[in-house]
């Protein structure tokens, strides 16, 4: 099969290799998917740059979509021919979706509803499921005011849509003009340009000094500073799924205690079995009802995988970056 892989950490054009590898064969409980698309996420870039390798060759990317063409022992033959999207394709496994084929446990290949194309399917494993879980942890949002950091990014775009579906008022943050517009297109009621505006001050102005009820956050290393500035109202919740600084982040304890603030963190790769079932069921319902808009920012052929990684690293593409296998 055609595939892309790396055997050392480093820059995309220096370590990514294109070539042929043996076609994988599904084992017990597994399916083989002939991939049509592969999603490129910031975490894939970070893994290639610095995550220790767990095998001699790493085929990157956890997200993708395609058609099941083989099944292993214990899997119903009727699954052959199913259009599916994938989650955790390369999480704790060496071979991800940047290839013609992937084998993985059958539960990680989820039915792709009719009318949803393979490009959109490559956006679900990380961006969409992260958004769904963030909203679940936030609790009921009807009538509440929500801050969505990075509302013009892939996950934030989904979160904004989901919060609106629940009846929330959404304040989004973004930086680049195109991302500010992307957040508006998702339906955010107000947008704060975090590069030019004092975020906490603007939040207080927009909430009559009360602060928001919920923060749905992509970067705790920056958003944590807002907690000491009254941006989150008393008894509010911050739900976080990422941070630019993955080590020590300073947080002022007094406003947390006196405000009875709640902090929740999660990693979409490591959802509990119950949370995984709930997020998959919720997303399936949203897709069936056609309630989500999927934004493909740029598509690349597999042979151009280095350029795709550079596009994600550069941060200029608005929407998801997808590889196609054709």
Image: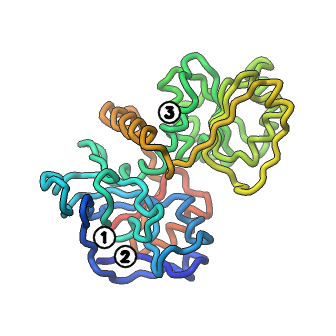
From the image, tell me which residue sits under label 3.
Answer: 161
**Circle nearer the N terminus (1, 3):** 1
Decide: marks 1, 2 in contact (CB < 8 A)? yes
Name the residue rendered at 55%, 79% in the picture: 13
Q: Is residue 191 visible?
A: no
Where disc 2 sits, the SS reads strand
Q: Which tag is nearer the camera, tag 3 or tag 2?
A: 2
Q: Nearer the viewer, residue 113 or 75?
A: 75
As displayed, is residue 227 above or below residue 315?
above
Q: Which colour assignment does the render follow?
A: rainbow
Question: Picture coordinates of residue 98 (x, y %)?
Answer: 40, 68
As displayed, is residue 111 above or below residue 11?
above
Question: Picture coordinates of residue 141 (x, y %)?
Answer: 56, 22
Q: Is residue 114 left or right of residue 208?
A: left
Q: Is residue 34 left or right of residue 174?
A: left
Where disc 1 sits, the SS reads loop
Q: Which mark is residue 56?
A: none
Q: Nearer the viewer, residue 107 or 168?
A: 107
Quarter location, residue 233: top right
How many C-alpha atoms fall within 10 Å of the one at disc 2: few (<14), some, or many (≥20)? many
From the image, tell me which residue sits under label 1.
Answer: 100
Q: Nearer the viewer, residue 191 or 9?
A: 9
From the image, tell me which residue sits under label 2.
Answer: 3
Q: Is residue 320 visible?
A: yes
Name the residue rendered at 42%, 76% in the picture: 4
How many C-alpha atoms fall within 10 Å of the one at disc 3: few (<14), some, or many (≥20)? many
Q: Quadrant of the C terminus?
A: bottom left
- Give the total number of marks visible in the rendering: 3
**Circle nearer the N terminus (1, 2):** 2
Q: Is residue 27 left or right of residue 167?
A: left
Name the residue rendered at 23%, 42% in the picture: 114
Q: Quadrant of the N terminus?
A: bottom left
């Amino acid at each position: 099969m055609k595939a892309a892989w790396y055997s050392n950490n480093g820059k995309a054009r220096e370590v990514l290799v294109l070539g042929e590898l043996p076609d994988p064969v599904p084992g017990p409980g597994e399916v083989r998917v002939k991939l049509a698309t592969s999603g490129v996420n910031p975490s894939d870039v970070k893994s290639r740059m610095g995550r220790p390798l767990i095998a001699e060759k790493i085929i990157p990317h956890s997200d993708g979509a395609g058609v099941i063409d083989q099944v292993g022992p214990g899997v119903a033959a009727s699954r052959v021919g199913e259009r599916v999207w994938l989650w955790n394709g390369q999480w704790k496994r060496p071979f991800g979706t940047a290839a013609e084929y992937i084998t993985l446990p059958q539960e990680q290949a989820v039915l792709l509803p009719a009318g949803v194309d393979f490009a959109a399917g490559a956006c679900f494993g990380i961006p969409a499921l992260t958004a769904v879980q963030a909203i679940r942890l936030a609790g009921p949002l009807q009538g509440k005011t929500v801050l969505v950091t990075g509302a013009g990014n892939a996950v934030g775009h989904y979160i904004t849509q989901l919060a609106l579906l629940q009846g929330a008022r959404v304040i989004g943050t973004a930086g680049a003009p195109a991302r500010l517009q992307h957040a508006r297109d998702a339906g955010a009621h107000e947008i704060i340009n975090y590069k030019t505006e004092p975020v906490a001050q603007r939040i207080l102005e927009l909430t009559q000094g009360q602060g928001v009820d919920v923060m749905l956050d992509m970067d705790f290393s920056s958003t944590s500073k807002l907690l000491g500035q009254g941006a989150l109202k008393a008894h509010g919740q911050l739900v976080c799924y990422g941070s630019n600084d993955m080590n020590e982040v300073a947080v002022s304890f007094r406003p947390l205690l006196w405000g009875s603030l709640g902090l929740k963190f999660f990693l979409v790769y490591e959802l509990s079995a119950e949370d995984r079932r709930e997020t998959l069921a919720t997303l399936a319902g949203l897709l069936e009802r056609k309630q989500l808009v999927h934004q493909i920012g740029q598509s690349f052929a597999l042979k151009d995988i280095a350029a795709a990684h550079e596009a994600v690293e550069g941060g200029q593409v608005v929407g998801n970056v997808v590889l196609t296998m054709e």
